[in-house]
Amino acid sequence: MNKLEQLAYINNILYLHQNDALCETDKVEKGIISIPTGGGKTFLEAAIIAKDIIENDGFRLYVVNAPRIMLSYQLLFELYGFLQKLEIDARYMGVHSGRDVDIADL
């Protein structure tokens, strides 16, 4: 899959409100995306990272902080799925200080 096909895939898979938010991320260096529960924030975050990887060749490092291990796992799951569909190879590392109860949730 070439870059244009990858970007088209991202644009086609997102809902309109997610696509609007994705476009807005190109205009600013930092900000807050506020979407109601169930609106696809995690999926959108995976799309933002995937789009950034596509547009910026070479080594990229993304650090994502999440208040719960399950939220970081959810993002990793979405991102992994996204990158696999786009045929983008990446390495992943999760770092946390969770307890056994949190790990069992995975």
Image (tube, grey):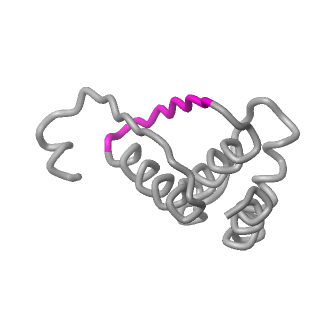
Relative horizontal placement of residue 97, taking residue 67 as reference (left or right): left
Q: 77 and 86: which one is in front?
A: 86
* Main SS category, magenta section: loop
Query: Quadrant of residue 8 in the image?
Result: bottom right
User: Residue at image x 59%, y 55%?
Assistant: 41
Indicate the position of residue 73 as horizontal and vertical percent values: 36, 48
- Does the segment drawn in magenta span residue 60? yes
4 up-or-down from 95: above or below: below
**From which residue to which does the magenta span run?**
59-69
9 up-or-down from 98: above or below: below
User: Residue at image x 50%, y 60%?
Assistant: 84
Q: Which quarter of the figure is the N terminus placed in?
A: bottom right
Indicate the position of residue 98 as horizontal and vertical percent values: 22, 32
Indicate the position of residue 55 as horizontal and vertical percent values: 76, 44
Indicate the position of residue 44 as horizontal and vertical percent values: 63, 56
User: Residue at image x 60%, y 49%?
Assistant: 45
Q: 50 and 88: which one is in front?
A: 88
